[in-house]
Image (cartoon, rainbow, N blue to C red):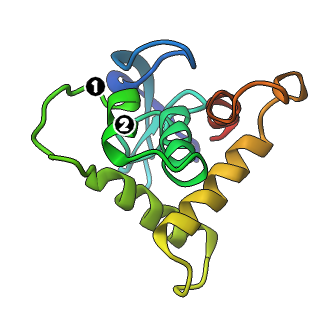
Amino acid sequence: MGLHGHGFRDREILGPPDAHEAPAKTLVGCRRYRCPGCKAIILVVPRGVAPRRHYRLAAIAVALTLWSVMHQRPLEVRERVCVARGTVWGTEWPTLRRWARAARASMSVPVAFTLREVAARAAQIAIGRAPPSLRTAPLWAQAFAGGQAMS
């Protein structure tokens, strides 16, 4: 048995649409499929869209790079990546730690590593996926390009 088409759904994606642009909300059209056997609905998203995340992979890669590799404060990282312009979070942004914990779980990093060290490892992986033509670009721009290439 195969999957059957089950319509379309728009998904809201947060973060900067390009490396040098301000953060924005973007609607992405996604295709849905249904498995006739188990009745599961599968949502197929474009490359660079993170499963079960509101932010695109490129935005997450930029945030982790700014926070862990370039040692910027969470407030500065939030201003660069986050769409919401409020001061609800104060000087912290808990989402950075949430993303670092998710990276730790997906990469099987030992618990002895701090969240910032885990974030730095994830950022270096994203930077490594950037095209060779961007090797002289800033690290956050390389992370953005590498995050776009990830799926």
Does 22 sit left or right of 130 as displayed?
A: left
Identify the secondary structure beneath mark 1: loop
Does 9 sit left or right of 112 as displayed?
A: left
Upstream in sequence: badge 1 or badge 2: 2
Q: Nearer the viewer, residue 13 or 22?
A: 22
State which quadrant residue 130 falls in.
top right
Q: Is residue 58 above or below residue 25?
A: below
In the displayed image of the protein, which residue is found farthest to the left?
Answer: 88
Q: Position of residue 14 (x, y in %)?
A: 35, 27
Q: Amino acid at mark 2?
A: Glu
Q: Position of residue 110 (x, y in %)?
A: 59, 84
- Quarter of the picture holding the C terminus: top right
Looking at the image, which residue is at 48% across and 16% down? Answer: 17
**Mark 1 lies on residue:** 83
Looking at the image, which residue is at 89% across and 29% down? Answer: 132
**Mark 2 lies on residue:** 76
Task: Kindly report which numbered mark, 1 or 2, lies closer to the viewer in this rendering.
Answer: 2
State which quadrant residue 11 falls in.
top left
